Amino acid sequence: MSREGIRKLLHRMRLSWTRLTYTLAKGDAEQQQAFEKQMELIKN
């Protein structure tokens, strides 16, 4: 699904696309990287 398709879907659900503005200091770096990799696969 394209970014535009996701944006339109979120809009229809009365939601919006936001970007991450910070990371938590106590966050697990490995889990964050795994999540980012998973999101990249979903976006493509």
Image (cartoon, helix red, strand yellow):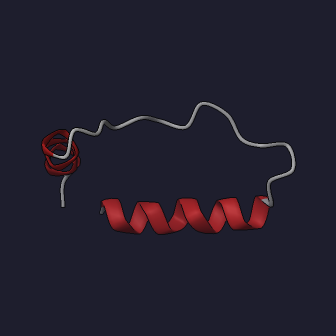
- Residue at 22%, 45% (x, y): give it: 10
- Residue that lies at the very extreme toward the top in this rendered image: 21
Q: Is residue 42 above or below residue 27?
A: below
Q: Is residue 19 above or below residue 43?
A: above
User: In the picture, residue 35 is in which quadrant?
Assistant: bottom right
Q: Quadrant of the C terminus?
A: bottom left
Residue 33: percent from the left, percent from the top?
Answer: 66, 61
- Residue at 19%, 46% (x, y): give it: 13
Count of marks overlaid on the render: 0
Q: Is residue 7 left or right of residue 36?
A: left
- Residue that lies at the very extreme toward the right in this rendered image: 26
Q: Is residue 7 left or right of residue 23?
A: left
Q: Is residue 15 left or right of residue 12?
A: right
Residue 31: percent from the left, percent from the top?
Answer: 71, 67
Of 17 and 14, nearer the camera is 14
Q: Quadrant of the N terminus?
A: bottom left
Residue 26: percent from the left, percent from the top?
Answer: 87, 50
- Residue at 34%, 38% (x, y): give it: 17
User: In the picture, residue 24 is in which quadrant?
Assistant: top right
User: In the picture, residue 39 is in which quadrant?
Assistant: bottom left
